[in-house]
Image: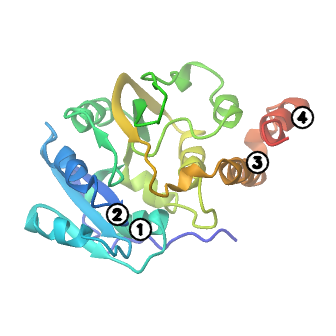
Amino acid sequence: MPKMHNISAIDSKQIPHRVSVIMPCYNGERYLEESIQCVLNQSYKDIELIIVDDGSTDNSKDIIKTYGNRLRLFEQTNKGPYPARNLGIQHSTGEFIAFLDADDYWTPDFIEKLFKALNPSNAALAYCGWQNVGIPGKTSEPYIPPDYETEDKLYAFLRAAAPWPIHAALVRASILKEAGGFDENFSTCMDYDLWLRIGANQPIIRVSEVMAFYRHHEQGQITSTQWRQAYNTWMVKKKFVKANPDMISKLPEQTLTKLIDGAQL
């Protein structure tokens, strides 16, 4: 059985229109203040910032505590970012949830624009474009993903890996909690697993602007080991196929084999 976190809400009251931003932090002192300020300076103001310190041994907690009641701090022994995110979900009170790591950042209108797209709709989440920054010797171009609702969404979701990075989306808290949060069996790719479970069979909305920035650096990111990423992507796809036989039956067997095993082979 998947190791799903118990995310039955401790703070069960869900406040309409509030956005809970969940930020895991492990030894993130280098960029932490920039990421915190990025949230606090959003043009959309009804935001609850939840930081889960994942057993930091640097000055991260001291930095966090300087913000006082402008944010909520929870602590755990070092378990990794996805258990930290699940803990944040458990304590969240917002109608909507976004995720931002302690070294990444958004444009100042990220929350506002995704909220305006998602709130009046029946969609489960809204997503946007992003850019990778800080890659040594490379220039990463801004990228706007396709509008998945205008193509074969299941095929598109299985064609590669995660359709957008974890911090490039705003999701309804009720949908996220109903899905059970992040599956902690995988060391990476739990966001891909979550977006598959939520987005493949529910409406989603694209905001066609680049508003999320993923920072590459030399300090032990879990996405830095490519073979592990590839293996876990393969395992996520196999898990989804097993759990959704009716959806998968619409794909020809040869196509399905190519989608699931092609990249791994």
Residue topped by disc 4 = 253
Decide which of 97, 64 is in the foreground and name it: 64
**For this view, does 247 lie left or right of residue 37?**
right
Residue most toward the bottom?
A: 77
Circles 2 and 3: CB atoms closer than 8 Å: no
Residue denoted by label 2: 25
Q: Indicate which label's residue lies in the foreground, 4 or 1.
A: 1
Residue farthest to the right, as pictured: 254
Callout 1 crowding tier (Cα within 10 Å): few <14, some 14–19, many ≥20 = many
Q: Amino acid at mark 3?
A: Val
| Dot 1 and dot 2 residues touching (CB under 8 Å) | yes
Q: Which residue is mark 3?
A: 241
Residue 168 appears in view: no
Image spot of residue 165 (x, y percent)? 47, 41
Q: Secondary structure at mark 3?
A: helix
Disc 4 marks a residue whose amino acid type is Glu
